[in-house]
Amino acid sequence: MKKWSKKQKLIRNIIIISLLAIGIYAGQIALSGFYRDADTAHAASEMTLHYGPSETRAVIAEVGDEKNTRYYLGVYDEWFCVDTVIKDWKGWRIGRNFGIHKIDYQKPLSYSWHIYDNEMVVYGVASDSNIAAVEISLRLGDQTIELRQEELFEDMFFFSQQVHADPILTEIRGYDREGIMICSLETGY
């Protein structure tokens, strides 16, 4: 067996490093779970949860204090979901996935809410096509705050609120294009 010269080894190593660099740059090879762009990280997140690809209704960037977070609102078959990807100095990575939830077509609004690291996220989908705006009521200790989204993302809504007390989602209301409330759901919490 012939030994390789130093020059041949150098050329071989340069080719290997070049192929790895091209693969990482093209986003095809994830470096410890990090991706070159947010969409690739989102697609990988959906694959790890064994669903998708979902139909993305909106991508919301820079919500709250995390300026490098993107929220993907989407629907898949009869399910709705919100998925996050986060960017740091290494690239984009899979963030929090709040799970997928079945759309209840018997109700005007299907929703879910979660609290993570002092951030409360409320999201959902409007089954009633007359709903043009959504408003939520949050109880934070002795205080109640109202948040309103005037324009839906197609038929989806999304709220993000920094909280420092134990929040309670008390009510979700749907409004038509004239601003008249057409549904009110007590959350039971």
Image (tube, grey):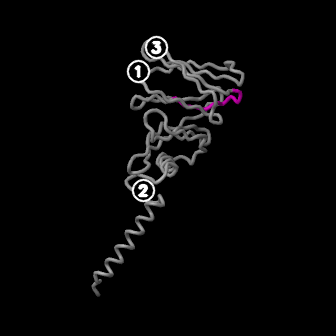
Residue 102 sits in quarter = top right
Q: Which element is circle 1 on?
A: loop
Please state the extent of the stretch shown in magenta in the rendering: 122-130
Residue 47: x percent and y percent? 50, 50
Disc 2 or 1, which lies upstream in sequence? Answer: 2
Q: Which element is circle 3 on?
A: strand
Asked if the stretch drawn in magenta spans residue 81, the answer is: no
Q: Which residue sits at x=47%, y=58%? A: 27
Q: Nearer the viewer, residue 80 or 83?
A: 83
* Residue contact between numbered discs 2 and 3, judged by CB atoms under 8 Å: no
Residue 46: x percent and y percent? 51, 47
To which residue does mark 3 refer? 143
Q: Which mark is residue 166?
A: 1
Residue 4 sits in quarter = bottom left
Disc 2 or 3, which lies upstream in sequence? Answer: 2
Residue 87 sits in quarter = top left
Question: Mark 2 to mark 1: distance in Å?
Answer: 37 Å
Q: Amino acid at mark 1?
A: Asp
Q: Which residue sits at x=39%, y=23%? A: 164
Residue 153: x percent and y percent? 62, 35
Residue 43 horizontal side relative to residue 5, left or right? right
Q: Which mark is residue 30?
A: 2
Residue lying farthest bottom?
2
Q: Amino acid at mark 3?
A: Gln
